Image (spheres, rainbow, N blue to C red):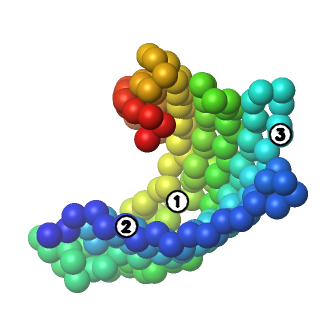
C-alpha cells in the first residue's frame, strides 16, 4: 500500500548514420499521494572519435504534479498547506554528456536543471512547497577481460542533490560469452 509505482512508454530513433537521435518518453510516477505525469522529449548528438564516441544529450520535460488529498490522513484537516493543494503543470530540462568505447565509459548527468518549486500560497505567503531538486550523477564503467569468454564490468556511480550528502554505489557484473 502506497509503494512507489512508475510506468514508462518510450520510443527513439537515430538518423544521419546515428550521429543524431531523438526520443520521447511518456511517464507516470506515483509516490504515496504525489504523482508526476508527463512527457520528455530527448535529443542526442554523437561525435565519433578514433575509437570512442562523445555523446551530448538534452531533454525537455513537461509534467503535471498532483497530490491526491484523499490519500492523506491529516490530524488537522483544516491545515492550510493541504487545503490549498492544486494540480499544477510545470516544465524542466536535463543535460548529459558521455564518453565511451568498448572497454570504458564515463558519464555526467544533470536532471532537473531548473529545479522548480511547486508552492502553496495563502494570503501571498508560501505555506508549503515541493521542489524538484537539481541533481548531479557521475558514473563510470570499466570492462576487465579475464579470458576469451569471461569479462567483468566494474562500475561506480556518485550522485549529489543540493543539501544532501553524496551517495556512492559500486557494482560488478560478470559477462560470459558476451551475454
Rendered location of residue 103, percent (x, y): 60, 25
Residue found at x 37% / y 30%: 174
Q: Is residue 87 above or below residue 10?
A: below
Quadrant in which the N terminus appears: bottom left
Quadrant in which the C terminus appears: top left
Where residue 78 sits, quadrant-wise, is bottom left
Circle 2 sits on which residue?
6
- Tell which of 174 and 88 is nearer to you: 174
| Label 3 vs 1, first from the N-terminus | 3
Is residue 103 left or right of 122 when viewed as pictured?
right
Mark 2 vs mark 3, CA separation in Å? 33 Å
| Label 2 vs 3, first from the N-terminus | 2
Circle 3 sits on which residue?
47
Q: What element carries label 3?
A: strand
Residue found at x 76% / y 35%: 54
Q: Is residue 9 above or below residue 104?
A: below
Q: Tell me if mark 2 has few (under 14), some (14-19) or many (20+) residues whose alpha carbon lies within 10 angstroms of its own.
A: few
Q: Is mark 1 on a helix, strand or loop?
A: strand
Q: Do the residues labelled 2 and 3 touch (CB within 8 Å)?
A: no
Residue 76 marker: none
Residue found at x 49% / y 65%: 118
Residue found at x 52% / y 59%: 117
Residue 117 marker: 1
Rendered location of residue 69, percent (x, y): 27, 80
Q: Tell me if mark 1 has few (under 14), some (14-19) or many (20+) residues whose alpha carbon lies within 10 angstroms of its own.
A: few
Is residue 48 left or right of 176 when viewed as pictured?
right
In front: label 1 or label 2: 2
Does residue 162 appear in this view? no
Q: Is residue 67 above or below residue 23?
A: below
Does residue 93 appear in this view? yes
Amino acid at each position: 500500500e502506497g509503494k512507489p509505482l512508475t510506468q514508462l512508454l518510450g520510443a527513439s530513433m537515430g538518423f544521419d548514420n546515428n550521429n543524431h537521435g531523438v526520443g520521447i518518453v511518456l511517464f507516470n510516477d506515483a509516490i504515496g499521494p504525489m504523482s508526476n505525469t508527463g512527457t520528455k522529449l530527448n535529443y542526442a548528438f554523437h561525435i565519433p572519435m578514433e575509437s570512442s564516441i562523445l555523446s551530448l544529450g538534452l531533454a525537455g520535460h513537461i509534467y503535471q504534479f498532483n497530490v491526491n488529498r484523499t490519500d492523506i490522513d491529516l490530524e488537522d484537516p483544516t491545515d492550510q498547506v493541504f487545503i490549498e493543494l492544486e494540480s499544477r503543470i510545470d516544465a524542466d530540462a536535463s543535460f548529459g554528456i558521455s564518453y565511451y568505447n568498448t572497454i570504458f565509459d564515463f558519464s555526467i548527468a544533470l536532471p532537473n536543471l531548473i529545479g522548480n518549486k511547486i508552492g502553496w500560497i495563502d494570503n501571498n505567503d508560501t505555506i508549503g512547497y515541493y521542489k524538484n531538486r537539481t541533481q548531479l550523477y557521475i558514473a563510470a564503467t570499466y570492462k576487465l577481460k579475464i579470458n576469451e569468454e569471461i569479462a567483468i564490468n566494474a562500475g561506480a556511480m556518485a550522485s549529489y542533490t543540493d543539501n544532501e550528502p553524496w551517495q556512492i554505489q559500486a557494482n560488478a557484473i560478470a559477462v560470459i560469452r558476451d551475454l
